[in-house]
Image (tube, rainbow, N blue to C red):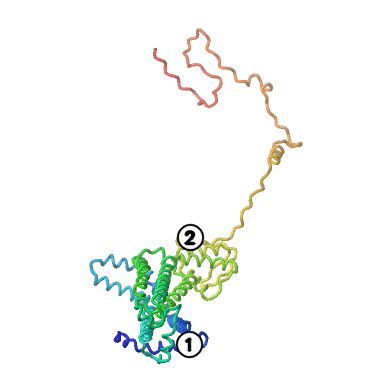
Amino acid sequence: MDTIAGLFSFITTPVSWVIVQFHAVYGKIFGPDTGWAWGLSIVSLVILIRICLIPLFVKQIKATRAMQTLQPEMKKIQERYKNDKQRQSEEMMKLYKETGTNPLSSCLPILAQSPFFFALYHVLNAIATGKTIGVINEDLLASARQAHIFGAPLAAKFTDSAEKVAQLGATLLDVRVVTAVMIVLMSASQFYTQRQLMTKNVDTTVKTPFMQQQKMLMYVFPVMFAVFGINFPVGVLVYWLTTNVWTMGQQMYVIRNNPTPGSKAQAAYLERLQKHVTQHGKTRGRGEKAIVKAIVAKGRDRNEFERKFINGLTKAGLVAQPDGLVVAGENTTVVESEDGTTTTAAAVPKRQQPKRQTKAQRQSGAASSSAPADDAEPKTSLSKSDEPQDAKPSSAAKPASGSGSKPGTGTRSKAQSGQRKGPQRPKSPSKK
């Protein structure tokens, strides 16, 4: 333990100095020997560290999204060189170099926090054993040993014996209840943080082993926190719970305002953005303009949520510009198809349906159209009585009895309707 403490001695003094400075401020408000003064000093230390790590957090987001984009290519390399591990590694490194991605970038915030975490652990461990460390002198050491959070000393652990806890002025039950509650909250916050990342901010169109690994970590990390948490002092639990809550809030902000393309969070964000732009007719802020600009620049590579966003603006009479601005369209309709192509057509006014008439109106109209005009000449038609007698068709004459004509050889005076004109083909004589 002394060897590990020596390795982190370069950071122990700055950490202890920051805690003492915050303690001097909170001590004037809550009292120098209270748990609030020392506990809030640790919380403020976490906030200060996380603010300094925001640039690394941005790099982590970019690296994670880049890794998600490369997952299909990585899967192809693994399948192509599954029997040659060396060639597989070489192709992976080549892919990282060509795309400018670094797998370790997603771990930068955790790696950067590690020195501060171990330094704080050794500061609290020194307080528990009654040793001065960094800038914490005898007076500050005595004040820290008297500080309790809900009845549990800052330096007490879940695995401490009753005698050791009694030396710090507390009972074993208070220490174990407080540490158990903090461990549960720490594990739950870690689980929720990972779960909202997997359910809301992951591209659902890409199914890769990377997603399976993230799902596994969603359950592994909380178990690890629970196992190792019983060996952490109360002050370290305060530190880790605070950093988990900070990570959860920071991630919620990123998911809401800068989601991963193709994720459920992007669909919700573009829906909110479309409503706002349709209502006000413009984009607001640099962030919205950057997102609209990125969507316009994709062209055919837009996903279904981005195509729906562009078509929604078009239906509202708005057009997204390459610079991220949104302007009103002028008598044009731009519609984007499934493959990302856009078509522009002149706006055509809607065809008005004729007014439906009542039954009485339809009958009166039909009667007026069928009635002849007064000045119109009457139509002339020949009735049966007016027809000349010789024009009437004579009935078919029966062959005279006793004549030698064969059946079927008689002629008809007029061809019946639907019968071929001209000489008819004689029927074949029937066999007797």
Q: Residue at x 57, y 68 (%)?
A: 276
Return the x and y of residue 356 as percentages of the image width and height.
66, 46
> Which secondary structure, mark 2?
loop
Q: Is residue 208 above or below residue 157?
A: above
Q: Nearer the viewer, residue 349 or 13?
A: 13
Most extreme residue toward the top is 402
Q: Which residue is mark 1?
A: 32
What amino acid type should be assigned to the residue bearing mark 1?
Pro
Q: Nearer the viewer, residue 351 or 283?
A: 283
What amino acid type should be assigned to the residue bearing mark 2?
Ser
Return the x and y of residue 173 as percentages of the image width and height.
40, 74
Q: CA distance from mark 1 to mark 2?
A: 67 Å
Return the x and y of residue 263 as percentages of the image width and height.
44, 66
Q: Nearer the viewer, residue 220 or 389?
A: 220
Q: Is residue 210 above or below residue 109?
A: above
- Tag shown at residue 337: 2
Q: Is residue 153 above or below residue 299?
A: below
Q: Is residue 279 above or below residue 44?
A: above
- Tag shown at residue 354: none
The quadrant holding residue 120 is bottom left
Q: Quadrant of the N terminus?
A: bottom left
The quadrant holding residue 119 is bottom left
Q: Nearer the viewer, residue 2 or 150?
A: 150
